[in-house]
Amino acid sequence: MATAVLVAGLSGCGSTPEDEFSGTSVDQLYADAREEASEGNYESAIKRYEKVEARASGTLMAQQAQLELAYAYYKTGERAQALAKIERFVRLHPTSPALDYAYYLQGLINFNDDLGLFGWLSKQDLSERDQQASRDAYESFKQLVERFPNSRYAPDARLRMNHVVNSLAAGEVHVARFYYRRGAYLAAANRAQTAVSEYRSSPAVEEALFIMARSYDRLELPQLRDDAVRVLKTSFPQSAYLTQGDATIDKKWWKLW
């Protein structure tokens, strides 16, 4: 009797969980997943997309499910899982007709993850945030616009690339300002120079040139100071920085109120 109970117990331990979708066709699962996602029920959609991806492996439906699953993960805040899905998709399907969307979604996830892009509205300190997400977003959008210039996603990707550049430049200038205020003039000049050389089209370059000029002045490097002032005058002839001193650097430029 004891042996029979033991065998029954071992049998129960070895059983697998019942598949709640075992009686649902893969086509119906996919349709249900899309419906759940359209209604904002992303957790429910994820369960179904995962089943579609597994059951329809090797088909176009599975590829589509992978991308929609990545988007659902993104909408539920599972950034790492979303990016992992996209990276796997790009690696396994380099000739997919949906590759442009994969790059766009990859960029979008990193773009929205980086508070440096719009975090200034909430008065958060740029120096406390890692801008790697911005760089990753830029690279994804760059892949999209270079490889698929006529993609429906390319125009928006270009706009977001401009936002990324401005964010990265603003981050460099913020750090330069931080160093200047603390008397680390060489470090301030170097970070400002990075903004000028790498992000020439960004509005933040104006302040970067000003910080360079003031830093070189404090370091008693008149030629470098004069060069920075000359470029500032040429590039921004109406700049307020030309008539203001260190008080301009102390102003929190990112505050709107």
Image (cartoon, rainbow, N blue to C red):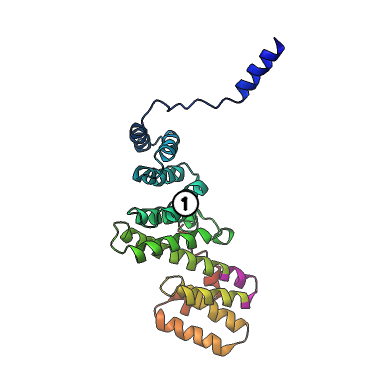
Residue 150 in the image: state x and y as whole percent.
28, 62
Residue 94 in the image: state x and y as whole percent.
39, 57
Query: Which stretch appears magenta?
Result: 176-186
Residue 36 in the image: state x and y as whole percent.
37, 34
Query: In the rendered image, which quarter contains the N terminus?
Result: top right
Amino acid type at image mark 1: Arg
> Looking at the image, which is closer to me, 148 or 9?
9
Q: Residue at x 46, y 86 (%)?
A: 230
- Kindly indicate the quadrant of the structure image that contains residue 221: bottom right
Instruction: Determine the residue located farthest toward the top in the rendered image.
Output: 1
Q: Check the image and report above or below for 194 versus 113.
A: below
Residue 182: in magenta span:
yes
Q: Check the image and report above or below for 60 versus 108.
A: above
The residue that label 1 is drawn on is: 88
Instruction: Determine the residue located farthest toward the bottom in the rendered image.
Output: 223
Q: Residue at x 39, y 43 (%)?
A: 62
Asked which secondary structure carries label 1, the reply is: helix
Dominant secondary structure of the residues highlighted in magenta in the image: helix
For residue 153, side relative to residue 232 (left or right) = left
For residue 9, side relative to residue 227 (left or right) = right
Residue 17 in the image: state x and y as whole percent.
53, 26
> Looking at the image, which is closer to me, 220 or 64?
64
Q: Check the image and report above or below for 8 versus 241.
A: above
Residue 62: in magenta span:
no
